[in-house]
Amino acid sequence: MSEEVKGSASPASRWRNQGTPLVGILCGSASDLPVMQQATAILERFQIPYDLRVISAHRNPDLVDEFARTAEERGLVCVICGAGMANHLAGAVAARTVLPVIGVPLSGSKLGGADALYSTVQMPKGVPVATVAIDGAVNAAILAAQILAVRDEDVKRRVWEFKESLAEGFRP
Ligand code: RP5
């Protein structure tokens, strides 16, 4: 069990430590970066520090294992995983951590992302992955911010401001 779960420090105060990444973002390939950088733009808007890495579930399975198993102790609060084709990245991470995992199925394959959508969303009972739309990196980052906002009033205020900007016609 992590120190934070044991309650030795206020999660909100720790989460405001801007030097520590709070959201992990994994991409299955450098070719995924143009879409996944939409997530980093949103997190920067919300002033949420993140840790972006390119690690493939298939090409770098040991790195995925290490990243996922150490995510909580490194202070991450949730993990966003974006990959295309047979997307096993989010599921592989979710199998190794109790942190919430958000999966982003990416298009670009000959199946247009339906392959990645099904392989991300169709998780077996007991190992959930919160799956957003195909290429939904923006929503993945907003959802990550909303998870943080449960315990961080500053992030909550920024998310509310963002929601109000949507009503005024702003499009992320
Ligand atoms: C997936 O295969 C990656 O996430 C990417 O979406 C797709 C193609 O990868 P590259 O061949 O461009 O590295 O694993």
Image (spheres, rainbow, N blue to C red):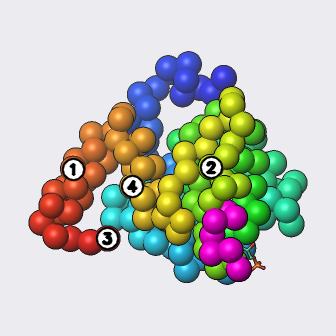
Report if residue 172 is visible in the image: yes
Q: What residue is shown at x 86% (from left), y 66% (from top)?
A: 59
Gap in Å between the C-alphas at discs 1 and 4?
11 Å
Which of discs 2 and 1 lies nearer the camera? The answer is: 2
- Mark 3 vs mark 2: give the one in front: 2
Are discs 4 and 3 less than 8 Å apart at CB? yes
Which residue position is annotated with label 4?
A: 142
Q: Amino acid at mark 2?
A: Val
Residue 160 - label:
1
Question: Which residue does the numbered mark 2 point to in the structure image?
Answer: 121
Q: In x, y percent, where is residue 7?
A: 50, 20
Q: CA distance from mark 4 to mark 2?
A: 18 Å
The mark nearer the N terminus, 4 or 2, is 2
Q: Nearer the viewer, mark 4 or mark 2?
A: 2
Sequence-wise, which precedes: disc 3 or disc 2?
A: 2
Q: Secondary structure at mark 1?
A: helix
Q: Are marks 3 and 2 in contact (CB under 8 Å)?
A: no
Mark positioned earlier in the residue sequence (4 or 3): 4
Q: Is residue 168 left or right of residue 121?
A: left
Disc 2 packing (10 Å; few <14; some 14–19; many ≥20): many
For label 3, the crowd category at 10 Å Cα-Cα, with few meaning under 14, some 14 to 19 and many 20 or more, is few
Q: Are marks 4 and 2 in contact (CB under 8 Å)?
A: no
Total count of labels: 4
Amino acid at dot 3: Pro
Tell me the SS state at disc 2.
Answer: helix
| Left or right of residue 81, residue 86 in this image | right
> What span is colored magenta in the figure?
110-116
Separation of marks 3 and 2 at Cα, in angstroms = 24 Å
According to the picture, the residue beneath numbered tag 3 turns out to be: 172
